Image: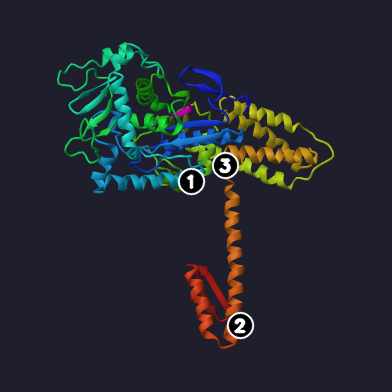
Amino acid sequence: MNTNLLVYNSLSRTMQKFEPINPPYVGMYVCGPTVYGPAHLGHARPAITFDLIFRYLKYLGYKVRYVRNITDVGHLEQDSDTGDDKIAKKAKLENLEPMEIVQIYTEDYHKNMRLLNVLPPSIEPHASGHIIEQQQLVEKIMDNGYAYESNGSVYFDIKKYAEKYRYGKLSGRNVDDLLEKTRTLDGQDEKRNQCDFALWKKASPTHLMHWPSRWSEGFPGWHLECTAMGIKYLGETFDIHGGGIDLQFPHHECEIAQAVGALGHDTVKYWLHNNMITINGKKMGKSLGNAMSLEQFFAGDHELLEQPYTPMTVRFFILQAHYRSTLDFSNEALKASEKGLEKLMNAIHALKEIKPGSTSSFSVQELSDKCFDALNQDFNTPVMISHLYDGVKHINLMKDGKETLTEDDLNALRKLYNDLCFDIMGLLDESSSSASSNDNSEVIGNLVDMIQKLRASAKAEKNYALSDKLRDDLKAAGVVIKDTRDGYEWSLA
Ligand code: ZN
């Protein structure tokens, strides 16, 4: 496999040629959601970013194993080592089992990802299903001397680790500063240093989710699951680890320390991070009153929204920014995306109708090269989309008969727009999906008509039992027939 793909590695802070460890196979791990509330806008960006990367790598011919986890245990409030488990807190609040909360919001997440046309990952492991793997990882880290037990909990020993390795290399933090700033003043603390993080926590008597271990009845630290499941499903070295930039520290920094502490080496070749979404220039958050669920977004049901926005408008909007740039959601920007997407889809519709000419007015190959060059520059979708708009100008000129393409070039242009818009960007033609539901109702109408004719001939033969049976069977199949004076009416139940 020889491609010109360059990716920006957050670890080296440089663009690097993408060369998988074991081509054509690519292993990609992305931190998934903590499922304690409805899927929101903040979930959409990493999901769509890594969906694009997943789709493009597959398009290039790689065989990608994409692992995206579900965090269902151990993620404490403020991402810290104290406080309630986010899921358990919600369970107490709603008087449900924690696993009921996990079920409800995993479903919700999946439903919204389907609407956004995000492909399911190859493997979607749950943290709670990998307690043994996580405990084994803790054992390894302890055996290597980088973790210690304290009151039934186990902590990663940053000071010890920093004697040999560089803690902070991903986020650019200085370990001496961390040790200095976070030095505990209170001798009662379980930790040797305040910046040490939990690998295993002893559960308090009221804690809902806990498992037996040789240290205590407890639960794994939040950072542990991704290291354990990444190694389990992708091996001791794999290609890509992704997630939101907010996870760089402490989550991913701790993941690196855990992997190195257990194995003596890094597991990840390329670290990729998507930037954050802001709303009207402000950070998004529950406490700020601007956290919008995707459902509210699609329904236009939030005071900040002037109208509903379709899943594809949201998807296109996210792809119109480079994944490493911040992205500000505003009604103006979203409406512009809505218009832009419509323009693109109209051009694709027009492209189907255009007839070939004897000469070509412009180079399709050149346009194609520009689009793929942009994608190969660290998945630069906004630049690629701007080239697609240049092509739209040509399509509109062809529609007006002012430009032409030969049959081969025209077919190449159609393929280019199909590949880039649908296969790689993962857009859906929302106007054609409503058209196809119209087609469906036409098909159902024809079938109902056919069955009505059978009923009429049954009645003519005085076989009322058969006529009634056909009506009842239709009803069971979801079609309600009402006999009227002039014939019949039908509706879907
Ligand atoms: Zn993670």
Q: Quadrant of ligand 1?
A: top left
Direction bottom: furthest residue? 462
In terms of depth relative to the viewer, which is nearer, 381 or 310?
381
Q: Secondary structure at mark 1?
A: helix
Tag 3 or tag 1, which sits nearer the N-term? 1
For marks 2 and 1 on the same chain, the one whose residue lies earlier in the sequence = 1
**Percent position (x, y) of residue 183?**
23, 15
Picture disc at residue 114: 1
Up/down of 49 relative to 257, above or below: below
Q: Residue 446 occupies which quadrant of the picture? A: bottom right
**Real-space Cα separation, disc 1 to disc 3, in angstroms:** 12 Å
From the viewer's perspective, is residue 296 above or below residue 51?
below
Residue for point 61% across, 39% down: 421
Give the extent of the magenta segment: 238-243
Q: Secondary structure at mark 2?
A: helix
Q: Residue at x 54, y 71 (%)?
A: 490
Rendered residue at 30%/46% (across/down)? 99
Magenta: main secondary structure: strand
| Apparent side of residue 66 relative to residue 184 in the rendered image (left or right) | right
**Residue 427, label in figure:** 3
Give amino acid for label 3: Leu
Tell whether label 2 touches label 3 (CB within 8 Å).
Answer: no
Real-space CA distance between mark 3 and mark 2, rounded to the nearest whole angstrom? 48 Å
Residue that label 2 marks: 457
Say which amino acid is labelled 1: Arg
Q: Could you tell me residue 300's position as x and y percent? A: 44, 46
Picture quadrant where residue 287 is located: top left
Image position, residue 336 (x, y; %): 55, 37
